[in-house]
Amino acid sequence: MTRAMPYVSVATSLVPMAGVTLALKAETGVELADPLDGAAGRTAALDLGATWLLTPDITLSANLAAQQEWGLFDESIGRSVRMATLGARYAVSERFTYGARLSWSRHDDPGASYDKAGLALSLRGDF
Amino acid sequence: MGRLSIALVLVVATVVPSMAQSPLALSSEIETGWTSNATDSATGGADFYVTHSHDMALTGSAGNLLLRGSLALTQTRFASLKFEDDAEVTGAIEAQLALGAATLRLGYAVTQSWTGDDLSIGGLAIPVRSVASEHEYVAEFTLRGVDQQVIVAVTGDWVLPGDSVLGELGLPPLRLTPQVGSVAGRVDWERALSPGLAVLAGMEAWFTLVPEAERIVYARAPVDGGRVSAGFRLADGGWSAEGKGGVDLVWPGG
């Protein structure tokens, strides 16, 4: 009953021009905390992100992510999430930051699929 | 860069608080917004919400010993679908002892959560209110050399769900999920071969604990496993890359 799977993890970031950062992360793994099949899950995740420091106070970001889990001892079930996020942050002072975020995600669970979209505005203070 | 610089590259990966920092750190964030699916389910509806979160951390040091205590609170309230309201409080304490080239870190955190969810039955969303507490432990020993470091860590996690209340069904409160504990151990080694290149190797072992009486009731089986991996880390000016490969092994636990 022992299952053996390849493990791969890749993370890279690139600064193609001043203020712009591109990042990629991909990883396979094992889900034991909350597995879909009640025993263990095999997982894969991909994350692509970009941030642009438009001015010293304003940062724009974009992110695409996908996560997949397959039942390890019941391979007939699986679930996946795909996400897209756009965000902006404005440091109004040294301590306070405004944020805005637009998000969309697609969830495919066993027997049910649904979308989720959202718009959020935030204010953060660090003291 | 010489060997000293290489050592500094390795040290960056560890948490070393600046002595210039204030011993008390506070942060708060309030977020409001709209979501098209407040229940995170196929029967979900749109709603407006407000989330506020607050973190407070107090850090003190005495000689080679660094102590940090923290308290975090997060609460989400929905405008219409109030059964989806969530709240969570976490208290944590951490001690870090510097022993020459070695560092010992011990930590404990407890989280209490009140979660709103829904149970989809035949297209109907049944409100479910649940409580749970989670205890987390970490012990980490880091040994640094001139151009290499080894980290040995053991972590533990124990989730204790409480009874859930299923709205509109008239049922007495009942627990919907099992108690699940996990213990993990890992050994990570890395060595800098040049200022921009380090090799990595690691081993992990995972153990899941589910009380025997709950395995059949909640259809939850304990599973153990482990990982052996090796890789590299590259960094050069405007880019960095890290790649690891290996094998994951998983088998039914006792």
Image: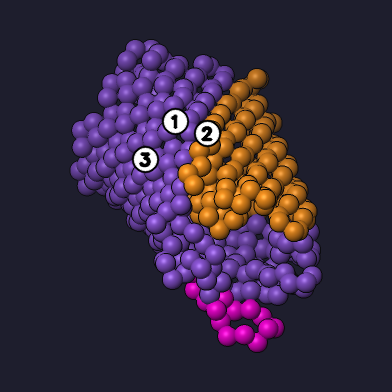
Q: CA distance from mark 2 to mark 3?
A: 15 Å
Relative to B131, is B20 on the left or the right? left
> Residue under circle 3?
B186
> Residue under circle 2?
A7
Q: Is residue B205 visible?
A: yes
> Does the magenta run of residues contain B63?
no
> What secondary structure prevails in the magenta region?
loop
Q: Residue at x 31, y 39 (%)?
A: B152
Q: Is residue B16 visible?
A: no
Relative to B223, is B99 on the left or the right? left
**Mark 1 chain:** B
Is B113 in front, or is A26?
A26
Question: For the residue carrying disc 2, how many other residues have a C-alpha within 10 Å: few (<14), some (14-19), or many (20+)?
Answer: many
- Picture coordinates of residue B63, whole percent (x, y): 20, 43
Mark whose residue sits in front, 2 or 3: 2
Q: Secondary structure at mark 3?
A: strand
Circles 2 and 1 in contact, beta carbons < 8 Å = yes
- Picture coordinates of residue B10, whole percent (x, y): 37, 26
Task: Identify which amino acid the numbered label 2 is placed on.
Answer: Tyr
Q: CA distance from mark 3 to mark 1?
A: 11 Å
Q: Residue at x 62, y 58 (%)?
A: B30
Q: Earlier in the sequence, mark 3 or mark 1?
A: 3
* Magenta-drawn segment: B161-174
Q: Secondary structure at mark 1?
A: strand
- Picture coordinates of residue B142, whole percent (x, y): 30, 36
Is A20 in front, or is B102?
B102
> Does the magenta run of residues contain B169?
yes
Which chain did the image draw in orange?
A: A
Task: Identify which amino acid the numbered label 3 is placed on.
Answer: Arg
Task: Identify which amino acid the numbered label 1 is placed on.
Answer: Ser
